[in-house]
């Protein structure tokens, strides 16, 4: 089972419902985000926004808006993903893998 | 700096919003001579416990918002840490004066889908938006103040 599948299965009670034709793309890009997260943080991109397409991080931007505009300029109405490079996600992925997805620190 | 003053309702600090497609995607629709979905009005709760802004699936469906990605999100109102679906959108907090120049406009914003309908509002304004604001919750007076 892939890392992404692990994460989404661990959060099964809240697993998002999306049209089946989009699921593969979403899971591929989410797996990419997870795979690249440590590297992006190590390179100082924490808090910035990664533009992801076809399972690859293409660029990193300071704001959501910049990342969204870059994605639209490059891909038009074709789907792409923008994910915030969130330092908290390292621990969150670990929590989900451990099956503690309902833990709420707040 | 515009200031929005409001009364605290039983549900909390509620503000009117308009949700629509983000500016970058609207520009693409225009260039392709495609129809632009009409923005939708809704009530939203100012929620400093929410990490990100979230919207009810009814809004996502009404607008046909462009799908972004999965994301890990901590939304206490949605049961805590969850894998959520993000969409590209634009969000306006409507100033009660009716003067559009006083609205808070976020022309390109990622929003998370979260079932909220039964709670009496259809969006949560999270810390991603509140980070741009000064938010004063005056419980004893039953008032709140949002400056941006």
Image (cartoon, rainbow, N blue to C red):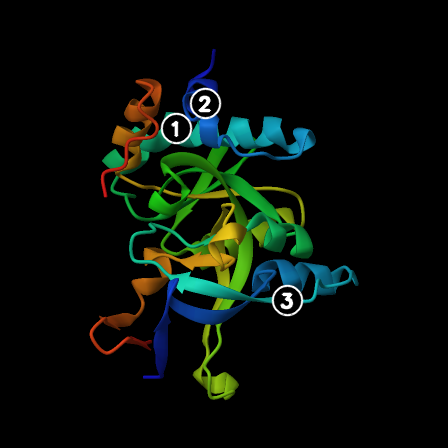
Q: Which mark is residue B39?
A: 3
**Percent from the top left, x then y, of residue B135?**
27, 70
Q: Which residue is drawn at the image coordinates 33% and 30% (left, top)?
A: A102
Asked whether disc 2 touches disc 1, contact meaning CB atoms under 8 Å apart, the reply is yes
Residue B55: tell me if it is visible. no
Q: Chain of mark 1?
A: A
Q: Chain of mark 2?
A: A
Q: Which residue is drawn at the image coordinates 23% and 71% (left, top)?
A: B139
**Percent from the top left, x then y, of residue B55?**
51, 53
Residue B99: tell me if it is visible. yes
Q: Which mark is residue A54?
A: none
**Which of the two discs, 2 and 1, labels the residue nearer the N terminus?**
2
| Residue reaching furthest to the top | A1
Q: Which residue is drawn at the image coordinates 34% and 19% (left, top)?
A: A97
- What is the distance, in whole Å, between disc 2 and disc 1 at their CAs? 8 Å
- What is the distance, in whole Å, between disc 3 and disc 1 at their CAs? 33 Å
Asked whether disc 2 touches disc 3, contact meaning CB atoms under 8 Å apart, the reply is no
| Residue reaching furthest to the left | B140
Q: Which mark is residue A4?
A: 2
**The N terminus of chain B, quarter of image:** bottom left
Q: Which residue is drawn at the image coordinates 58% and 34% (left, top)?
A: A17
| Residue reaching furthest to the front | B10
Label 1 neighbourhood size at 10 Å, few (<14), some (14-19), many (20+)? some
Q: Nearer the viewer, residue A32 or A95?
A: A95
Say which of marks 3 and 1 sits in front.
3
């Amino acid at each position: 089972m892939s890392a992404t599948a692990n994460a989404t299965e661990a959060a099964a009670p809240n697993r998002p419902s999306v049209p089946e034709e989009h699921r593969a793309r979403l899971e591929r890009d989410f797996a990419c985000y997870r795979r690249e997260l440590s590297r992006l943080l190590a390179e100082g991109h924490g808090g910035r926004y990664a533009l992801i397409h076809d399972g690859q991080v293409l660029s990193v931007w300071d704001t959501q808006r910049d990342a969204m505009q870059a994605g639209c300029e490059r891909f038009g109405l074709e789907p792409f993903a923008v994910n915030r490079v969130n330092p908290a996600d390292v621990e969150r992925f670990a929590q989900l893998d451990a099956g503690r997805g309902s833990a709420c620190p707040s | 700096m515009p200031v929005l003053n409001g009364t605290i309702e039983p549900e909390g600090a509620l503000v009117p919003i308009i949700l629509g497609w983000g500016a970058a995607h609207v520009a693409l629709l225009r260039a392709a001579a495609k129809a632009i979905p009409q923005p939708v009005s809704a009530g939203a709760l100012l929620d400093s416990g929410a990490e990100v802004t979230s919207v009810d699936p009814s809004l996502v469906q009404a607008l046909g918002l462009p799908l972004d990605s999965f994301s890990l999100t901590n939304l206490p109102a949605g049961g805590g840490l969850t894998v959520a679906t993000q969409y590209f959108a634009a969000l306006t907090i409507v100033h009660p004066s009716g003067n559009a120049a006083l609205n808070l406009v976020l022309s390109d914003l990622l929003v998370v889908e979260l079932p909220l309908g039964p709670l009496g509002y259809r969006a949560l304004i999270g810390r991603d938006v509140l980070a741009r604001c000064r938010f004063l919750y005056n419980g004893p007076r039953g008032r709140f103040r949002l400056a941006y």
